[in-house]
Image (cartoon, rainbow, N blue to C red):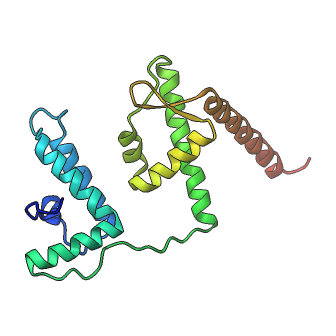
Amino acid sequence: MQNGQEFVDYYGLLQVDPNCDDKILEVAFHHFAKLYHPDHAETADIQKFSEVTEAYRTLKNPEKRSEFNRLYEVHKGEQVQGNGFDTRIEINGKTALDDAEIHEKILHTLYRKRRENAKDAGLVGWLLQEMLECSEEHFEFHLWYLKSKGFLELTEQGTIAITIQGVDHVISRSRTDEVEKLLLSKAAMPDD
């Protein structure tokens, strides 16, 4: 929303409460983005798609959302209690283990896709994100990490695919897991 333009109620567009948290905002955005996306012949609406995208981009950014909330209060006469974001991020051992598990899920999914069709091995990012049920920001972190390790690549079609290094990693992890299972089963057996 530029200066001089008519006020647009981004909360109304996304049909969310102005005090909603970032997860509710994201769910609403994905719902309407899919509904209005040009690929959906029955419900496609490019203008609405652009509007909900702009609304989400503004409201997901804490600084832009605070600025929008001031405009919202002036135009709607309703006070917004907060920006809906919890800026405290707690990182602990469980977080790292959860991230490692998500990385393995991504790699295993893309490994299967590559095995099914080696020439067209990519998946669309939003599909992976939905499968993982994680926020856009967390998904971007996972992609950054796996791309930096050389395990993922973006294809010419804009999809995400596993690399040779990624395949080697999956195979190596599978071997390690099998060895661990064998060792555990041997340790559980009583001595004769």
Residue 1 seen anywhere in this rendered image of the structure:
no
Name the residue: 50% across, 33% down. Answer: 110
Q: Nearer the viewer, residue 52 or 63?
A: 63
- Residue 131 falls in which quadrant of the image? top left
In this view, the residue farthest toward the right is 192
- Residue 24 falls in which quadrant of the image? bottom left
Q: Nearer the viewer, residue 161 or 110?
A: 161
Q: In the image, residue 171 lies at what x, y percent?
A: 67, 31
Query: Is 185 displayed left or right of 4 in the figure?
Result: right
Name the residue: 57% across, 63% down. Answer: 95
Name the residue: 19% across, 32% down. Answer: 39
Q: Nearer the viewer, residue 148 or 123?
A: 148
Residue 163 seen anywhere in this rendered image of the structure:
yes
Compared with 185, 6 (above or below) is below
Q: In the image, residue 26 lies at what x, y percent?
A: 30, 58
Query: Is 181 displayed left or right of 127 in the figure?
Result: right
Q: In the image, residue 139 lies at what x, y percent?
A: 45, 50
Q: In the image, residue 119 lies at what x, y percent?
A: 47, 16
In this view, the residue farthest toward the top is 119
- Residue 60 falls in which quadrant of the image? bottom left
Counting labels gives 0
In this view, the residue farthest toward the front is 4
Name the residue: 22% across, 74% down. Answer: 69
Compared with 5, 70 (above or below) is below
Assign the N terminus to one quadrant of the image.
bottom left
